[in-house]
Image (spheres, rainbow, N blue to C red):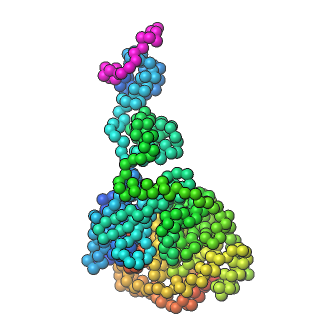
Amino acid sequence: MEGPSSVRKGAWSKCEDDLLRACVQLYGEGKWHLVPQRAGLNRCRKSCRLRWLNYLKPNIKRGDFSEDEVDMMIRMHKLLGNRWSLIAGRLPGRTSNDVKNYWNTYMRRKVYSHKKDNNVEKQADEAKSTVQRHQVIKPIPRALTKTAPRLQGKLFNSSKVGVSEAAGAASSGSGNWWETLLENKKDNHEGNIINNTCFFGGADGELDLWDEELNPIACDFLSEGENWSDFLLDL
Amino acid sequence: MENSTQESHLRSENSVSYESPYPIYGMSFSPSHPHRLALGSFIEEYTNRVDILSFHPDTLSLTPNPSLSFDHPYPPTKLMFHPRKPPSSSSDLLATSGDYLRLWEVRDNSVEAVSLFNNSKTSEFCAPLTSFDWNDIDPNRIATSSIDTTCTIWDIERTLVETQLIAHDKEVYDIAWGEARVFASVSADGSVRIFDLRDKEHSTIIYESPHPDTPLLRLAWNKQDLRYMATILMDSNKVVILDIRSPTTPVAELERHRGSVNAIAWAPHSSTHICSAGDDTQALIWDLPTLASPTGIDPVCMYSAGCEINQLQWSAVQPEWIAIAFANKMQLLKV
């Protein structure tokens, strides 16, 4: 058995690269402890594995990191810290070595400075200045039960009174949104515009149908209110 | 353009098409510039675009304005113009959501980034935002919804958080104002909840999806009649109509789509009309009846696009036009 001192170190030659590439093509990745022997390389298995994963693998991307990649790297580093293999896993074609080197070369000193177009860059600067303290409130959800049968008549005959009672029964202490919403009903009714133009109707008959469908909207607010109440009573 | 039925016969005087270089999702009509539309791209990468188009109803044409096109990081999840006319200015304000809530000033020949809103306490990065709504009664407020289960109320002028609420148990997918201090939201937890900023300690659940793990995706609050809301469930062909006074039981379920529903919008000028669009390539307009029908409700109008419709907007300033987005196309339909 060869002694440790005879294992080659240092830069890989083209010949060695070719041997390693051929071996992985033939046997696939993995079983790195067998690769030096199979490939005829005088290298330790770790060295073979790293050479393949960081340099020879065909899908490895060369060239500068793109804007997208840098942005993703920043976000992932914020989430994961210096876990380069996890970060590289989200950057197709980039190795953990590339990510680590890029970060330590460009990012660590500049603390998250990176290219963006002018508008976004300006807004990004604002992002830092707007990190702020404020309280996050967790409201307690209430699930209102169905309106009690005894209230149904009142609710639909007189919306105002009905809602007040329902609010009182269902949610004592805070029924504001019920009342204010209903108070706005009248205002919302203004601006109700009828538009009889129909794009979809092909035949004249269907066009007439469209007009007929729109006619009920022409009723005044009280009639509309009554109609809605009738609709609800049938449920 | 495919026509699956006779009713959807396409006539050139009733629709206008625009083909974008990229898929479209976010859309907004401008209230202050009646012929202006914003479109957001949906490219699953960092670099995306927002384009501003001009609509000419007399010539039925849509023209992009290249000087008003700008880069936007990530696909905008929602676009919305300022709900009112700025007092003494010809420019428009446009808000976009995505990695942050961002505010842009749309001028005559350029777009300027105005503000970026960050609600994270510990980081320069904000949890991704799924949607937002601009309060039209108090336009200094925008409410955003996020995948981190929170809803945030922003003070627009001061670029600050006014309130942040842990609104739901899971991701919050959409949010809508009812009035100045009342909003509602829908979530992956399957519930519709109403919040009143005057009582931040409580919220009210007014609907929960029938199957506990079915997320609710979109919410539309009827601005003509605040008693009614509409929501849609994930992978469902139903549009669920809710009456906030009659909690837990929908007043109607519209079930004529033959695929998942992706978008809903109430008519801005009628309290009983709602439009829905979905994976069956159809946009349907419904007229909600005053009496419940045992056989279910049929739509009054139908339009077929060439493929799945992802987004829908009903113009408030020109209520005879509806915008739909499918694949790379945006189409205006006259109703």
- Location of residue A26 in the rendering, given as x and y in whole percent from the top left corner: 38, 24
Closer to the camera in the image, B304 or B166: B166
B254 shown above or below A72: below
**Residue at left offset 65%, top offset 87%:** A158
Q: Quadrant of residue B245?
A: bottom right
- Location of residue B102 in the rendering, given as x and y in whole percent from the top left corner: 44, 62
B260 shown above or below B178: above
Report the quarter where the N terminus of chain B lies: bottom left
**Residue at left offset 48%, top offset 36%:** A85
B146 shown above or below A198: above
**Residue at left offset 48%, top offset 68%:** B157
Closer to the camera in the image, A77 or B334: A77
Closer to the camera in the image, A144 or B180: B180
The answer to whether residue B72 is seen in the rendering is yes
- Location of residue A59 in the rendering, given as x and y in whole percent from the top left corner: 36, 36
Magenta-tinted stretch: A1-18
Q: Quadrant of residue B27?
A: bottom left
A171 shown above or below A119: below
Residue A8 placement, left or right of A157: left
Report the quarter where the C terminus of chain B lies: bottom left
- Location of residue A182 in the rendering, given as x and y in whole percent from the top left corner: 60, 82
The answer to whether residue B207 is seen in the rendering is no
